[in-house]
Image: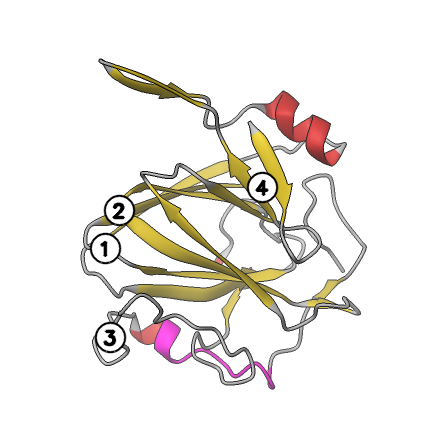
Amino acid sequence: MKITECNIVGLYIIEPRIFSDARGFFMESYKSADFADAFGVDIAFVQDNHSLSHEQGTIRGLHFQSPPYGQGKLVRCTRGKILDVAVDVRKNSPTYGQHSAVVLSSENAKQFWIPAGFLHGFITRTPMSEVQYKCTAPYMHACEGGVRWDDPDLAIDWFSQGLDEKNITISEKDAQGQSFADFQSPFSFGETDSGLGEKQ
């Protein structure tokens, strides 16, 4: 399993080793010992989520969950293809407001580790895309929040590879997210819990 840090401290791309033969393939999608070796701490996942998006151009995000229920997420696409995006919102971070975007697909089998302290969202690049992710904290309605996916201050290029920005599918809730300028981050850079998520 290859684990590579992205351009923003705390974000990692995980590439499992895939064994293929005439029957198909086999891979270890998660191994706690490998994560402990890479991060120097054991990560405890407490909830697995699974989403299906019917249409190409479906946007989910940008989401976060505040402390004490900040979520670290290990994201993978098990069917189809997505562009997965994480935005650094850790106060005093040298990359505050910057983002990293990774193409995840059933073909490349890559995974994206996003600790708490980041906004998270994705856009589907193919119809019938399925996304699964492991979380370090359970969902907590009282702590959830969101920022507009298309906020100009974030300047995220969602529509590369020919996607039509006029033909998207998004929930009313996500479409009405707050602006980044109005967002008051509950996270601080350099303060981590046992799941490598940022906390107050």
The disc label shown at residue 80, or none: 2
Which residue corresponds to mark 3?
Answer: 164
Q: Earlier in the sequence, mark 2 or mark 4?
A: 2
The magenta region covers 174-182
Coloring scheme of the render? secondary structure
Q: Which mark is residue 126?
A: 1
Q: Which residue is mark 4?
A: 136
Closest to the camera, between mark 2 and mark 4, is 2
Cα gap from disc 1 to disc 2, whole angstroms: 6 Å
Instruction: Identify the residue shown where x is 40% and y is 47%.
Output: 104
Q: Are marks 4 and 3 in contact (CB under 8 Å)?
A: no
Figure quadrant of residue 158: bottom left
Choose the circle earlier in sequence order: 4 or 3: 4
Name which residue lies at 62% across and 52% down: 6
Mark 4–mark 3 Cα distance, whole angstroms, equals 34 Å
Sequence-earlier tag: 4 or 1: 1
Question: What's the distance in space between the residues labelled 4 and 1, CA to CA?
Answer: 28 Å
Q: Who is closer to the viewer here, 189 or 185? A: 189
Q: Residues within 10 Å of mark 3 (few under 14, many from 20)?
A: few
- Please report whichever mark, 3 or 1, sits nearer to the chain's N-terminal start: 1
Q: Secondary structure at mark 3?
A: loop
Residue 12 vertical placement versus 54 (above, below): above
Mark 3 or mark 2: whose residue is earlier in sequence: 2
User: Would residue 13 be counted in the magenta stretch?
Assistant: no
Residue 82 coordinates in the image, percent (x, y): 35, 54
Q: Residue at x 48, y 29 (%)?
A: 16
**Crowding near the residue tagged with mark 1, few <14, some 14–19, many ≥20 C-alpha atoms within 10 Å:** some
Are the residues tagged 3 and 2 within 8 Å (C-beta)?
no
Structural distance between the alpha carbons of marks 2 and 4 = 25 Å
